[in-house]
Image (cartoon, rainbow, N blue to C red):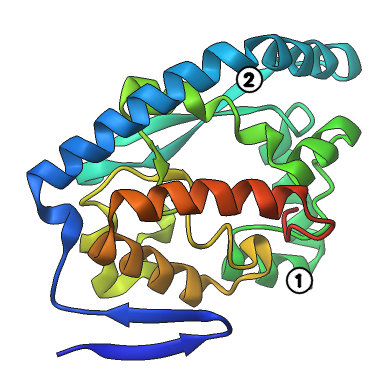
Amino acid sequence: MELHRLYSENLIVLSVKNNLSRWYNQFVKRVFDLVVSVIGTLLISPFLLVIAILIKATSPGPAIYAHMRLGRHGKMFPCYKFRSMVKDADKKLAAYLASNPSAKAEWEREQKLKNDPRVTRVGMFLRKTSLDELPQLFNVIIGDMSLVGPRPITRSEVCKYGTYFSDYEMVRPGMTGLWQTSGRSDTSYDRRVRLDAWYVRNWNLWLDISMLVKTVRVLLSKDSGAY
């Protein structure tokens, strides 16, 4: 029995099958991730160095930072990103939310702010183009993440997944996924959860390849939905 639900142009089919519960599918996915991420990292390494230099030259602090995220089997891991925020960003966020009720409600609902006062000028560009996420290629090589998969979440977000959390923790979170090609930051949280569940249950290698191609198209478009 299948449940059908239409979201814009995406047909979400939640079914009793679960493709990524099979070990051989996970093996194929891991080999694909490893080969593509290693080759990709080698090819763009000069570009990564340029971004790191720009970050260091325009604001104090490290070029790359790690934020703890929830991975496969509920294991916490350091998710790498190019730093797009000012130093002491957590303190600045707490002060900002305390004085802005509407921003606090947005943060509690989406875990993101459309107009985040912590973001630097270079960071704003990196986020808009998603270049800040390129260091996650190292997460993929290590084995903490996948090229395509559910959006990596914090422990505080688990309650938002409800019964779908079992799908999330079965696989490695991804650098990109259905949510990123379906509106990204403009996508509601509930829709993100359902997109993640659909991906896990209906995975195939061609889906990963098509998601990577679509991600490039979205990022090259004028309105990628990122912030």
Whether 90 is drawn above or below 213: the answer is: above
| Contact, mark 2 vs mark 1 (Cβ under 8 Å) | no
Whether 62 is drawn above or below 218: the answer is: above
- x then y, percent, for residue 99: 81, 61
- Closest to the observer, 90 or 149: 149
Disc ID at residue 83: none
Q: Residues within 10 Å of mark 2 (few under 14, many from 20)?
A: some
Q: Which amino acid does label 2 sit on?
A: Ile
Confirm whether residue 75 shows in the render: no
Looking at the rendering, which quadrant does residue 129 occupy? top right
- Outermost residue, left direction? 23
- Closest to the observer, 95 or 188: 188
Q: Which of marks 2 and 1 is in front?
A: 2
Decide if residue 225 is on the left or right side of residue 146.
right
Q: Residue at x 84, y 47 (%)?
A: 117
- Closest to the observer, 102 or 27: 27
The residue tagged with tag 2: helix, strand or loop? strand
- x then y, percent, for residue 212: 52, 46
Q: What residue type is labelled 1?
A: Pro
- x then y, percent, for residue 140: 39, 28
Q: In which quarter of the image is the N terminus?
A: bottom left
Whether 123 is drawn above or below 212: the answer is: above
Residue position marked by numbered label 2 in the rendering: 64
Disc ID at residue 101: 1
